[in-house]
């Protein structure tokens, strides 16, 4: 089976390529390298023993996609490509809608031209907006609170419409909670450009001495210790979820939506303590005001993915933190 992976040199994409290659799939990547580097493929090849093909191109370029589908007999597509910074999406909404929606439109159009109807799409827990309660299940009301989230919601609606129009489509929309960690080898991980926005990459750069102190955004939230609670899920577990979703699509047409999370919420202070415990590295922090747009608590109900995909998150906090730290040390000395 040959899988086209858009955004395959990125954080979740690169881990998913490792998972697919390790399970005998052939992988072709299309990525414009806007937020990733081609050099990750050397490390994907080193850990999996196989090297994916990379086409450096924008997914919105239909002619390039046609060239890929002509050259490769693609069986299914995993669509990771997109822009993902919430703050930036508020500043540059048109760029986010153009990229995140335009890429899906071009991709689905060309897939249909080539009779390829199996698609796994990267959605996000952000589509739940401010959830009224936890755990959050797939049937909760959907609401976007920023252009990034809205681009995910619109994509989900487009994909539902697509199936209504043509029942040959097999589509899985995976709503990730908070992806963290790195490949267990320490050779593949998230490589944020500039100062990270998300907790775990920031925290690990503080531990490495690249940033001086972690700002904890508020200790007055209605949570047990007052800091924000999230469902952190190891990126290698997410990668495995994509393989399981592909297997599901092999069996049934339809549009399927799954939460991918651990069903456990941890606070910011618990994450700091877990990281210090797993790595032995101190993480200096200070409490500051709340970050605009944040929510108090969010964690998944993931029983649907368990029942229908046979997927559960196998890795715990210790692995999330120690793998992330291994990657931090490796990338600081080895990754250009
Ligand atoms: P990432 O930025 O590491 O990877 C995305 C990849 O897509 C990058 O390599 C980038 O160069 C590429 N890309 C972007 N626009 C493109 C285009 N038009 N054509 C070709 N390539 C393009 O991000 P990630 O963390 O791996 O996220 C992957 C997907 O998962 C995204 O759709 C993101 O919105 C979604 N997601 C991520 C998170 C998270 O916290 N990381 C959470 C929920 C959902
Ligand atoms: C953020 C995005 C969300 C996206 C998710 C991907 C926002 C508002 N939301 O979610 O749309 O799907 O990333 O993983 O940007 N924190 C600190 N200090 C920091 C960074 C974070 O205290 O320097 C806290 C936050 O307040 C939050 C928790 O850590 O309570 C997790 O934050 P983060 O990693 O940014 O993820 P989310 O806010 O859940």
Image (cartoon, rainbow, N blue to C red):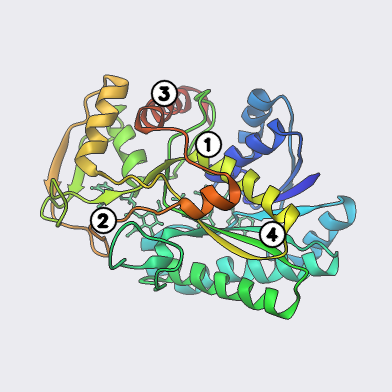
Residue ranking furthest to the front: 307
The residue that mark 1 highlights is 236
The residue that mark 4 highlights is 119
The image's mark for residue 329 is 3
Q: Which quarter of the picture shows residue 81?
A: bottom right
Picture coordinates of residue 117, whole percent (x, y): 77, 63
Nearer the observer: mark 1 or 3; the answer is: 1
Nearer the observer: mark 3 or 4; the answer is: 4
Question: Is disc 1 placed on a helix, strand or loop?
Answer: helix
Packing grade of label 1 (10 A; few <14, some 14-19, many >=20) is many
Residue 30, can we see it? Answer: no
Instruction: Tell me if the residue at label 1 has its CB under 8 Å from ligand 1.
Output: no
The first of marks 3 and 4 along the sequence is 4
The residue that mark 2 highlights is 297
The first of marks 3 and 2 along the sequence is 2
Question: Is disc 2 placed on a helix, strand or loop?
Answer: loop
Judging depth in this view, the residue of 140 and 80 nearest the camera is: 140
Residue 231, can we see it? Answer: yes
Question: Is disc 4 placed on a helix, strand or loop?
Answer: strand
* Mark 3 vs mark 4, CA separation in Å: 35 Å
């Amino acid at each position: 089976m040959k899988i086209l992976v858009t955004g395959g040199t990125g954080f979740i994409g690169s881990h998913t390529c490792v998972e697919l290659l390790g399970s005998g799939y052939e992988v072709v990547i299309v990525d414009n390298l806007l937020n990733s580097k081609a050099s990750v493929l050397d490390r994907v090849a080193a850990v999996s023993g196989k090297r994916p093909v990379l086409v450096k191109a924008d997914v919105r370029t239909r002619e390039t996609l046609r060239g890929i589908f002509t050259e490769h007999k693609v069986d299914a597509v995993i669509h990771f490509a997109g822009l993902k910074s919430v703050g930036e999406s508020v500043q540059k909404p048109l760029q986010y809608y153009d990229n995140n929606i335009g890429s899906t439109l071009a991709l689905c159009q060309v897939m249909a031209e080539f009779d390829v109807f199996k698609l796994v799409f990267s959605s996000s827990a952000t589509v739940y907006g401010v959830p009224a309660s936890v755990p959050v299940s797939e049937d909760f009301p959907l609401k976007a609170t920023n252009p990034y989230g809205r681009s995910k919601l619109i994509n989900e609606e487009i994909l539902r419409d697509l199936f209504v129009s043509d029942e040959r489509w097999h589509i899985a929309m995976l709503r990730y909670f908070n992806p963290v960690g790195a490949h267990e080898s320490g050779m593949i991980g998230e490589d944020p450009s500039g100062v990270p926005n998300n907790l775990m990459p920031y925290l690990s750069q503080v531990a490495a001495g690249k940033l001086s102190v972690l700002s904890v955004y508020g200790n007055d939230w209605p949570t047990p210790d007052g800091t924000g609670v999230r469902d952190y899920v190891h990126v290698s577990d997410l990668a495995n979820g994509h393989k399981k979703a592909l297997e599901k699509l092999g069996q049934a047409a339809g549009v399927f939506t799954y939460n991918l999370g651990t069903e456990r919420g941890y606070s910011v202070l618990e994450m700091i303590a877990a990281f210090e415990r797993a790595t032995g590295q101190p993480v200096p922090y200070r409490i500051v005001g709340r970050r605009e747009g944040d929510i108090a608590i969010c964690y998944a109900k993931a029983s649907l993915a368990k029942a229908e995909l046979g997927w559960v998150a196998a890795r715990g906090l210790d692995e999330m933190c120690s793998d992330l730290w291994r990657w931090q040390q490796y990338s600081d000395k080895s990754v250009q």
